[in-house]
Image (spheres, grey):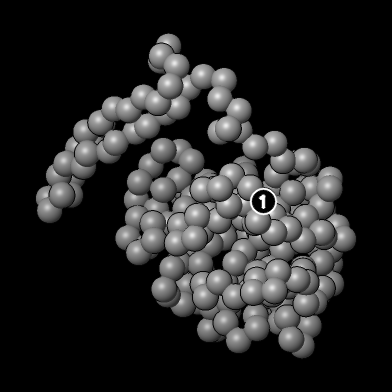
Amino acid sequence: KLPVGENSAVITLKTNDKNNPVYLITVKCRTGNNSENIKAIDGTITDAWLDKNTDILYLTVSQPNRLIAYDSKRKTIDREIMLSKAPTCFSISEDGHKAIVGHGGMISTIDMDNFSITKTTNVGHVIFDLEWGTNDWVCYTVGNGVQWTNLYWVNLLTNALETGEQTYENCMIKKVPHTNYILGSEISLSSGIYLFDINTRKRTTNISDSFMYFWFSDDASYIFDSWKIIS
């Protein structure tokens, strides 16, 4: 019921943080049939990540299968790569120079500087989520109806594959920014939060809880999840 045009409001968020008990959040919303704010993307978007430093929104899309770099300021597709199989997810390295894309049965490694595929690594699973480790190791979780499964590690240089600790299907994983740890959260029937050491490739923590879909703040001080909880 907002009028056509740009609308804004300030929301006061009261917290239990004694150092910052009140946050003022400015919310803006543009309404109306303004085609300049809508960009049609062919296919089905399977994963997305915004680089706040460059305002580039990265998207994996199936049918047609590709990785897209979308300039959110100019509202144009900056670059795109055609992929040989439908992507399920992707992850960009912390230094921004490499990316990995998960598919059914393989991982594509991408040089982000040249925006080109440098290697495909075959794995025996439909990948639900994947993340960077260290020293050419990456890890991934499995979906597609495989209930009790594992966290898997694969070396992109040697193709070595290691089977890690057990998880339930559809476990979301994200590297904790600026640390040597990966956080996992089961989002299906089971509830489990896991912490993995990327150097030892071992699980260090197991908690019977869930964040569902979750995201870190840039400094890793907070976790935001799809249950509208800030941790």
Rendered view: 96 above or below 134: above
- When the figure is inspected, residue 135 is found, relative to residue 130, above or below; the finding is below
Q: Residue placed at 77% from the left, 55% from the top?
A: 66
In the rendered structure, the answer to whether residue 96 lies left or right of residue 21 reads right
View extreme (top): residue: 1
Describe residue 14's horizontal placement relative to residue 113 as left or right.
left
At horizontal 41% and vertical 14% (from top left) the residue drawn is 3
Can you give x and y, in whole percent of width and height, for residue 227 in the image?
Answer: 45, 38
**171 relative to 182, above or below:** above
> Percent from the top left, x then y, of residue 27?
34, 33
Q: Does residue 205 show up?
A: no
Quadrant for the N terminus in the image = top left
Circle 1 sits on which residue? 77
Q: Position of residue 13 (x, y in %)?
A: 23, 36
Q: Residues within 10 Å of mark 1 (few under 14, many from 20)?
A: some
Q: Is residue 180 in view from this perspective?
A: yes
Total label count? Answer: 1
Query: In the image shown, does 190 or 223 lie closer to the viewer?
Result: 223
Left-right relation of 120 to 206: right
Q: Residue at x 69, y 55 (%)?
A: 68
- Drawn side of residue 130 relative to residue 183, left or right: right
SS state under label 1: strand
Q: Quadrant of residue 220?
A: bottom left
Nearest the eye: 22 or 37: 37
Q: Quadrant of residue 160?
A: bottom right
Amino acid residing under circle 1 = Ile
Residue sitting at the far left: 18
Q: Residue at x 26, y 31 (%)?
A: 11
Q: What percent of the width, then of the height, locates residue 171? A: 61, 55
